[in-house]
Amino acid sequence: MATSDVRQQLAAHLTRLWRYGLVLSRSRDMAEELVQSTCVRALERSAQYTPGTRIDRWLFSILHSIWISDLRARQVRQGQGFVPGEELIAPDTHTRDEERIHFQQIMQRVNNLPEAQRNTLFLVYVEGFTYQEAADTLAVPIGTIMSRLATARATLAKTVDARPAAKEKRS
């Protein structure tokens, strides 16, 4: 595929790539860097794209690969293991309506999941990837995707059940 064709396709997927970068990094700046690096790599390696396949999967794979490489490099520089990211907070911090509180509770539960489960949930439920597409993107067997999703769903269900029941209003 020609570089100009890849360039055209990139524009259509920038928002989705940025959203995935934000899910991975939990940082707007890092998400932007990931997307920029993904675009550069996709343009440099446009000859490696197989026409007729889904370009979004190819782009997500590139972004994921860059993220993993950056994580490994950071670990070496810091001499540490994975460092938990800051909590993902919804953008509007002034409005405290029920929807926002509900969103924050859901995001807190999802953020408490291990990174591999979080990434898998995002690809399958937010981006609509099939299990096989998610497996290809993350370079893991499809059984691993199914296992991560089942474990994540079970964990999220437990956190909902563990919440204290709302008190009844008695008059």
Image (cartoon, helix red, strand yellow):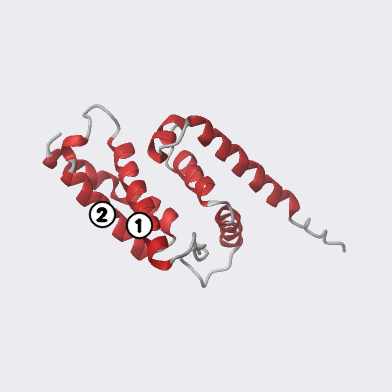
Residue plotted at (61% across, 37% down): 150
Marks 2 and 1 close (CB-CB < 8 Å): no
Please state the horizontal and vertical placement of residue 23, each as a whole percent of the image. Answer: 44, 54
Nearer the camera: disc 2 or disc 1: 1
- Circle count: 2
Q: Closest to the observer: 166 or 40? A: 40
Residue plotted at (27% across, 36% down): 55
Q: Closest to the observer: 58 or 167? A: 58
Residue at the spot of label 2: 37
Q: CA distance from mark 2 to mark 1?
A: 11 Å
Q: Quadrant of residue 77?
A: bottom left
Q: Amino acid at mark 1?
A: Asp
Q: Residue furthest bottom?
A: 94
Q: Amino acid at mark 2?
A: Ser
Residue plotted at (20% across, 35% down): 48
Q: Is residue 34 left or right of residue 171?
A: left
Residue at the spot of label 1: 70
- How busy is the neighbourhood of tag 2: few (under 14 within 10 Å), some, or many (20 plus)? some
Q: Residue furthest top?
A: 52
Give the mark nearest the N terminus, 2 or 1: 2
Q: Is residue 131 left or right of residue 137?
A: right
Please state the horizontal and vertical placement of residue 129, each as a whole percent of the image. Answer: 42, 35
Q: Closest to the observer: 136 or 53? A: 136
Q: Quadrant of residue 96?
A: bottom right
Q: Quadrant of residue 37?
A: bottom left
Q: Assign a secondary structure to mark 1.
A: helix
Q: Assign a secondary structure to mark 2.
A: helix
Vertical order, 108 against 143 (above or below): below
Q: Residue furthest right?
A: 171
Please state the horizontal and vertical placement of residue 76, each as a whole percent of the image. Answer: 39, 62
Q: Where does the C terminus fall, quadrant-wise? A: bottom right
Residue plotted at (22% across, 30% down): 50
